[in-house]
Image (tube, grey):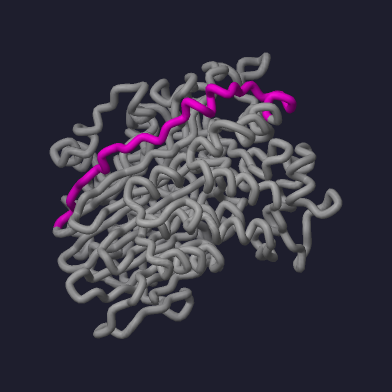
Amino acid sequence: MRKLTLVLVCLLVALPASAKPRLGAIASAHPLATEAGFEVLAAGGNACDAAVAVSAALAVVEPVSSGIGGGAFYLIERRGGQALFVDARETAPASATRDMYLGADGEHDRRRSLDGPLAAGIPGEPAALAHVVKRCGRLDLKRTLAPAIRLASEGFEPDAFHLLMAGMRKAALAASPAAAAIFLDNGEAPKAGFRLVQKDLAAVLQRLARAGKAGFYEGETARLIVDGVNAAGGAWTADDLKHYKVVERAPLRGRYRDMDVLTAPPPSSGGVALLAALNILEGFALDLRDSVTGKHLIVEAMRRAYRDRAEYLGDPDFVAMPIAQLIDKNYAAGLRAGIRPDRATPSASLPGAPAGPEGTDTTHFSVVDTHGNVVSATLSVNIPFGSGFVPPGTGILLNDEMDDFSAKEGSPNTYGLIGAHANAIAPGKRPLSSMTPTILRRGDTMAVLGTPGGSRIISMVLLGALEFAAGNDDPAAWVSTGRYHHQFWPDVIEYEPEGLNDTDRAGLERLGHTLKPVDRRYGNMQAIAWQPANGEMKAASDPRRKGSAQVR
């Protein structure tokens, strides 16, 4: 596989090979969030404490992509190898029904599942912050949330991407007076120089810092959320919030050649699809294939992995899933047997439901500390600025993750993904997600990576993992590699500018693939490479956006 080394276009800071970092490495989507993480590491915290600080800071400075009104997955490997997965995915409120987003004509009314309080699931991130600190941190919430509280109180100047997305989501934000007062400037999308101050959000974070989970899901904050949601047409109860719980799940494990894979279990579909695709590809000598054939085989593996995602996966607390079979090497061998090296497989010839859309505005960060603790975390509010709704007096921008359910079987969501009965709406259920925080090991090197990008998350992590598996230990290459994507349905290869060259495009079309260019580069991968034996760390932030990756 072609190795890309685009070090200069990445925000990459690495110490000399002989030196050991004093604190660790952090790669996140925003410089202020990365600084928050290092502030907490310098105060004596570990990677779990830093992860909480980064999460909370991102909730303040990157509300386009995540926030305490949303959810998160935390993949954690502690010193000594103990691994856990913290599922803080949003849940459907008790009032949710299978057909709640269908119009009078029986079709999915997407605006109702994207904008306003009816689109929001019960947030999980605040519970996760309290849980992660208690489960594996060294500090308390007052210390780990302090940087975020300060940023919310004092304000900051949003970057160009934030301002662009505020303009794109202006109508949804304007429909919520509390959101408009915070994120718009006299009813208009703000311009450069605008200072975003979030006093109500600071107060909410302070209550969370003082009282832990109860400081958000009970008391004053909970009352304001429920009252605000219901006054604007939603249907939440105090019990919806009070009964929310994060769930610890066993991470999925697999192996691709000499690379060990630790990744996310359901309700993430990402880990299952990642392992399935790698298992299929293990039977092909990609390093001996020409570029076109190699990409063709990767696309065919994506096609089959996404097919199974749509057909079988959902919330493990609600549906039985054949996970062991889906990630079994023998099952992959059967799928591999149906792949022709010289011809594309039409998706219509494979059984199963087409796959539907999923929100792209998510964020990822990676943390490694010098004690040997590792966190790979992906957080989301779904599409930019989530539902666009803020309950008055809270500053909390609620998610619109209810759109990640299958509102109607076979009907695509906002990211084109199609779901089956396994991902149908039900009270208390968690919608299926593509978020794929992942930790890889090959020889004496560990890779920590993940990315936002909706349904494309899985394919991006797959391409990054293949770079690492091919022997490339430079995280700048993983985050920079050109991207292409196939999700079973629609039956097209999407590719970003420079994701496929002229020879690749012509060759793939000769094999029968339909190509669809994406007009902009996508994703925002944050990655760390770590060699535990000598302590060397490298960190890289995706050059497509303006994140911050540092080793200190």
Which residue appears at 76% of the width and 41% of the height?
178
Q: Position of residue 473 (x, y in %)?
A: 27, 71
Q: Quadrant of residue 87?
A: top left
- Frontmost residue, 502 versus 243: 243
Q: Is residue 97 magenta?
A: no
For the point 40% across and 44% down, the residue is 73
Q: Residue at x 39, y 74 (%)?
A: 551
Quadrant placement of the N terminus? bottom left
Q: Residue furthest right?
A: 186
Decide which of 232, 21 is in the foreground and name it.
21
Give the image location of residue 47, x and y in percent. Answer: 36, 60
Quadrant position of the C terminus in the picture: bottom left
30 displayed left or right of 337: right
In the rendering, at what x and y percent does residue 350 appear? 33, 31
Q: Is 99 above or below relative to 161?
A: above
Frontmost residue, 309 versus 183: 183
Viewer-side residue, 208 vs 503: 208
Splitting the image into 4 quarters, where does residue 393 fall? top right
Residue 446 shows in this picture: yes
The spot of residue 289 in percent (x, y) is 23, 62
In the rendered image, the residue lying farthest to the front is: 210
Question: What residue appears at the point 45 percent right and 53 percent down from the top-left corner?
Answer: 52
What's the magenta region?
229-257
Q: Is residue 503 visible?
A: no
Residue 528 occupies quadrant:
bottom left
Direction from residue 69 to residue 424 in the image, left or right? left
Count of marks placed on residues: 0
Q: Is residue 119 above or below residue 88?
A: above
Whether 432 is drawn above or below 52: the answer is above
